[in-house]
Image (cartoon, grey):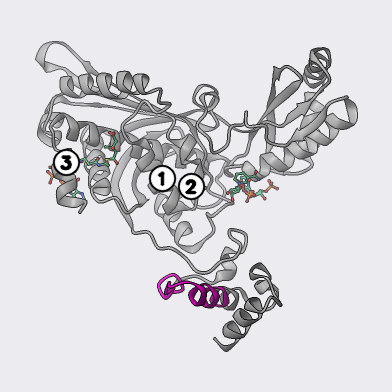
Amino acid sequence: MTDAVDLAARVREGELRLHELDDHADPDVAAAARRQLVESETDASLDSVGDYGFPAAAAEPNIENMIGAVQVPMGVAGPVAVDGGAAEGEAYLPLATTEGALLASVNRGCSVVNAAGGANVRVTKSGMTRAPVFRVTDVVEAEALVEWVRDNVDRLREAAAETTTHGELLDVTPYVVGNSVYLRFRYDTKDAMGMNMATIATGAACDVIEAETDASLVALSGNLCTDKKPAAINAVEGRGRSVTADVAVPREVVTERLHTTPEAIAELNTRKNLIGSAKAGSLGFNAHVANVVAAMFLATGQDEAQVVEGANAITTAEVRGSGSDGDLYVSVSLSSLEVGTVGGGTKLPTQAEALDVLGIRGGGDPAGSNADAFAEYIAAGALAGELSLLSALASRHLSSAHAELGR
Ligand SMILES: CC(C)(COP(=O)([O-])OP(=O)([O-])OC[C@H]1O[C@@H](n2cnc3c(N)ncnc32)[C@H](O)[C@@H]1OP(=O)([O-])[O-])[C@@H](O)C(=O)NCCC(=O)NCCSC(=O)C[C@@](C)(O)CC(=O)[O-]
Ligand SMILES: NC(=O)C1=CN([C@@H]2O[C@H](COP(=O)(O)OP(=O)(O)OC[C@H]3O[C@@H](n4cnc5c(N)ncnc54)[C@H](OP(=O)(O)O)[C@@H]3O)[C@@H](O)[C@H]2O)C=CC1
């Protein structure tokens, strides 16, 4: 502690910068010194922030200027039965949230999915993208660049391959806007979410393009990727994993466990998730997929800003069968779910344990299968959440549920 007090004093006197403390002390002492400083300059007490349960050194690749950790309550929903391309069997879903009623809702949805025989889930498209923007003189040069890229994808693939063993360049799609050319590189990043991998590999490919053409790189990311911003390109073309889950719920399960009818849910889905979302100009044609994506991202060490893309989802609901005997078919399709079971925050102790709950920590065999299974579990959780919330709205239980569980 004396070390921490001394270090904080040296920062206060202008001798050291806040971010240089790790060069003078081990990461836990450096964090304590920063807390000292912040406490002395604000009215805050940081006792709880400083009471974290892992060595600060473990978080070195994840954060700078660390002062401690925030703790978010984590629970489990399920188990939920999943018939996936990579995921198979029953799994508990780890969710970290502060929203009361969310776990109860997903848990109810999981029990309904199980009563219906489980969810079918498949990853239908995969690939992490990075789209640099190049300046060219005019449209003639733009066309020349596009042609060069088309003829030299193998050279770009080789340059990318020198930077990664797991990553593989799949394709490059050009977009021209006047004298700006955007090249959307798409990679198979196996079990990594892949944003560092794709960025580093694209940097190497851009060096080749600049050496061989008249184009000048303006930025390694030209926003057509599109990372961490709402964007139709991700909803249409996909980014990360595109994954779809569905289930056919017998009518009696809907009435007994969800207190409503297949017809009411189908109508609600059309008027709320489809028409309401269209009128709002929303990219999310769903009820609360973001809730499940965010809670599972937080629990498992994903990049939380990518909930923006993860929530690009469409929920459909229809009555299957005739007359008053029909069952309820519900699907949810997440077009751009960016997940990894290696890299990022996945190695941090609590996050790694949450991945163990799903049985998918680290690299899969074959490579990529763990991240595929992870995407499928999230989609199954999103399906459960949609089923439960739509039912609560149809049966007018939403406000009472939140009054009871969320306050
Ligand atoms: C709260 C329920 C589930 C009650 O629903 P219920 O059917 O009255 O509950 P129940 O007591 O009959 O229990 C049914 C099942 O629910 C689960 N369950 C029930 N209670 C718990 C609990 N304490 N802890 C864990 N699980 C629980 C559990 O699976 C249980 O089965 P059991 O295991 O007993 O056989 C229901 O009313 C519900 O799901 N409401 C919806 C709540 C919800 O989805 N909130 C999400 C957040 S809303 C939001 O953020 C987005 C929004 C709304 O703004 C988006 C939009 O615009 O649409
Ligand atoms: N740079 C950027 O622009 C951005 C970065 N981020 C951040 O990027 C990080 C995630 O990047 P990401 O590339 O996923 O992670 P990492 O940067 O950690 O890269 C993944 C690493 O895991 C190795 N690896 C080992 N086994 C496997 C396997 N089975 N499948 C895939 N890779 C494996 C890879 O080796 P090898 O490459 O040799 O194959 C690579 O070194 C997050 O921290 C995120 O917040 C987020 C947005 C933008």
Q: Which residue position is annotated with label 3?
A: 399
Pointers 2 and 1 in contact (C-beta within 8 Å): yes
Query: In 3D space, how far apart are the residues under numbered discs 1 and 3 (Cα atoms)?
Result: 22 Å
Is 240 situated above or below 10? above
Question: Left or right of 103: which side holds 69?
Answer: right
Quarter of the image for the C terminus: give it: bottom left
Q: Is residue 340 left or right of residue 389?
A: right
Residue 294 numbered tag:
1
Relative height, residue 238 to residue 163 (above, below) = above
The residue carrying mark 2 is 304
Q: Secondary structure at mark 3?
A: helix
**Rendered view: 254 above or below 362:** above
CA distance for labels 2 and 1: 7 Å
The kind of secondary structure element at disc 2 is: helix
Q: Amino acid at mark 1?
A: Ala
Residue found 41% across the figure and 29% down from its top: 313
How many residues crowd mark 2 within 10 Å: few (<14), some (14–19), many (20+)? some
**Is there any visible trace of residue 88 in the rendered image?**
no
Q: Is residue 33 magenta?
A: yes
Q: Which span is picked out in magenta?
A: 32-51
Residue 56 visible at all: yes
Mark 1 or 3 closer to N-term?
A: 1
Q: Toward the viewer: 34 or 305?
A: 34
Judge left or right: residue 288 versus residue 258: right
Say which residue appears at 54% left-offset and 72% top-offset.
55
Task: Tell me which amino acid carries mark 2.
Answer: Glu
Three-letter code, disc 3: Ser
